[in-house]
Amino acid sequence: MPFSLSIIIPVYNAERFITKAVESACEQPEVTEIVVIDDGSTDATQEIVNQLQDADIRIKLYHHPNKVNKGRSASRNLGIQKASGKFIAFLDADDYFLPNRFANDFKLFQENQNCDGVYNAVGFHFYRPATELELNTHQLYTVTQKVAPEALFKNLLYGKCGHFHIDGLTVKKSVFERTGLFDESLIVAEDTDIFWKMAIKSRLETGIINKPLAIRGVHEENIFVNEGLYKVYNIKMHEGIAIWCSKNQVSSAVVDDVLKWIWMLKHKQQNKLYQDIAAWARFFFSQPQLLFTMFSIKYFPVIRYRQMLFPFLYRR
């Protein structure tokens, strides 16, 4: 199988880091194309990439119409659409690959024709002083043990064996025909959304998970702490997964697992009963393919809280 590989690098105002990112991709012998999507940068990013293009014809630069800023998901989606390789890997503009990033991926794809993707460990580099907590906890971003493809989604959903980072993932481009592209409505959690869809619909194999093959750069500009936003979009992401599953012939057991997590996330919000009923109504009535199933009854708040609401029915 020819290993034509496109690297997709979305970039927004990353003049400090883009050279290292692009050059780390250029150094990988398996890479046939480097697709840089300039997401409306207002700094010197475009000029730097233009200079890099003079040194390596594999580098291609694209913009959104009118050079507007559309965010990470839209930029990655444009990169996927422009990519010509049979395989796709991603690299954030402030991150970089380590030597031999794709050697083992290539081996796994050659050995297993049914393999749709490989995930690997990603490390961290601090461009700013790191706290003691960060030094202790930010060593490897990885799945912590080899997982059978059939068990991967449930392990990711329940957080049993760690997580993915997008810099460590290589997939066949055809995977996106099954998953769709990145969800541009998600401000955060868009990468988790696509990882889970891949785990459900594709065969993803464990690669190198005990040492990093790529490095995530941590600096002042990419620290984003907004717990409220993450709580909102984490639920939206789970709801989107449930809807996507119901429309793509995914087993009812998977849908049930996702809905269970939606329920638990909302339960943690400690809403009033009428608020939970309203949320249930908005979700299920907007999705007829779920409304007319056992799930709309099973996850109706009055049913879920029946022992609390009607304790006399459960007395012995």
Image (spheres, rainbow, N blue to C red):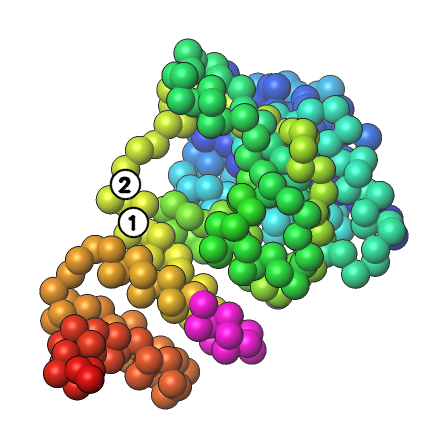
Query: What predominant SS class does the magenta segment belong to?
Result: helix
Mark linked to residue 292: none
Name the residue rendered at 12%, 71% in the picture.
274
Residue 158: give x, y in percent of width and height. 47, 55
Give the residue pinned by disc 2: 227
Viewed as shown, does residue 212 lie left or right of 285? right
Q: Helix, strand, or loop for circle 2?
A: helix
State the count of labels: 2
Q: Is residue 34 above or below residue 148?
A: above
The part of the chain drawn in magenta is: 246-257
Indicate the amino acid at tag 2.
Glu
State the CA–CA distance, disc 1 to disc 2. 6 Å
Residue 263: give x, y in percent of width and height. 31, 65
Name the residue rendered at 42%, 53% in the picture.
184
Q: Quadrant of the C terminus?
A: bottom left
Name the residue rendered at 45%, 68% in the picture.
257
Q: Nearer the viewer, residue 51 or 216?
A: 216
User: Does residue 186 show up?
Assistant: yes
Mark 2 is surrounded, within 10 Å at the Cα level, by few (under 14), some (14 to 19) or many (20 or more) other residues, namely few
Residue at the farthest top position? 129
Indicate the amino acid at tag 1.
Lys
- Contact (Cβ within 8 Å) of mark 1 with mark 2: yes
Viewed as shown, does residue 245 lie left or right of 146? left
Give the residue pinned by disc 1: 231
User: Does residue 245 show up?
Assistant: no
Q: Nearer the viewer, residue 221 or 69?
A: 221
Picture quadrant where residue 104 is located: top right
Name the residue rendered at 24%, 44% in the picture.
228
Viewed as shown, does residue 173 lie left or right of 113? left
